[in-house]
Amino acid sequence: MNAIIQQLKRARLAKKLKQSEFGVKLGLPQSHISKIEQGGSDPRLSTVSDMARLLDQELVLVPRSMLPAIRAMLSGDETQKPKWQIDEEEGA
């Protein structure tokens, strides 16, 4: 969960939102936002989802077996082959 929270913090900072401003939008005090971002509070999934949506992010659950392919797509790593391939037409 910590990696997700840190990604959300980076997104908040990129939008130049102060913790207090972000808290107002979420209906939470600034001190609670600070605790979440510092790992001192374990937020509910609904809170993390609300945080993500306010920052134009989306939480997505994927099967663990698909993680290598998804990471390859996101990183642009050409050496990691996805576990799926588009069927090529014969003779093409």
Image (cartoon, rainbow, N blue to C red):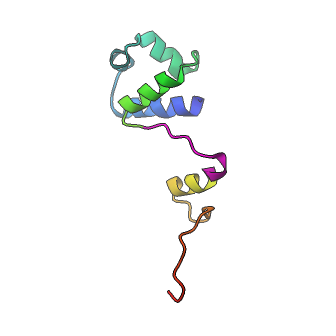
What residue do we see at 59% from left, 64% from top? Answer: 84
Q: Looking at this rendering, what residue extends furthest in the bottom direction?
A: 91
Quadrant containing the N terminus in the rendered view:
top right
What residue do we see at 39% from left, 32% from top? Answer: 53
Q: Does the magenta stretch include residue 37?
A: no
* Residue 82, image x, y percentages: 60, 62
Q: Is residue 65 magenta?
A: yes
Left or right: where does residue 69 sit relative to residue 52? Answer: right
What residue do we see at 51% from left, 22% from top? Answer: 37
Q: In this rendering, is residue 52 above or below 82?
A: above
What residue do we see at 52% from left, 19% from top? Answer: 36
**Residue sitting nearer the eye, 12 or 70:** 70
Q: Main secondary structure of the magenta part?
A: loop
* Residue 45, image x, y percentages: 53, 25
* Residue 62, image x, y percentages: 58, 45
* Residue 49, image x, y percentages: 46, 28
Q: In this rendering, is residue 7 above or below 38?
A: below
**Residue sitting nearer the eye, 57 or 35:** 57
- The number of numbered badges drawn on the structure is 0
Left or right: where does residue 59 sit relative to residue 81? Answer: left
User: Range of the magenta residues?
Assistant: 58-67
Q: In this rendering, is residue 80 above or below 29?
A: below
State whether residue 78 appears in this view.
Answer: yes
Q: Looking at this rendering, what residue extends furthest in the right direction?
A: 65
**Residue sitting nearer the eye, 79 or 46:** 46
State whether residue 13 appears in this view.
Answer: no
Q: In this rendering, is residue 4 above or below 92?
A: above
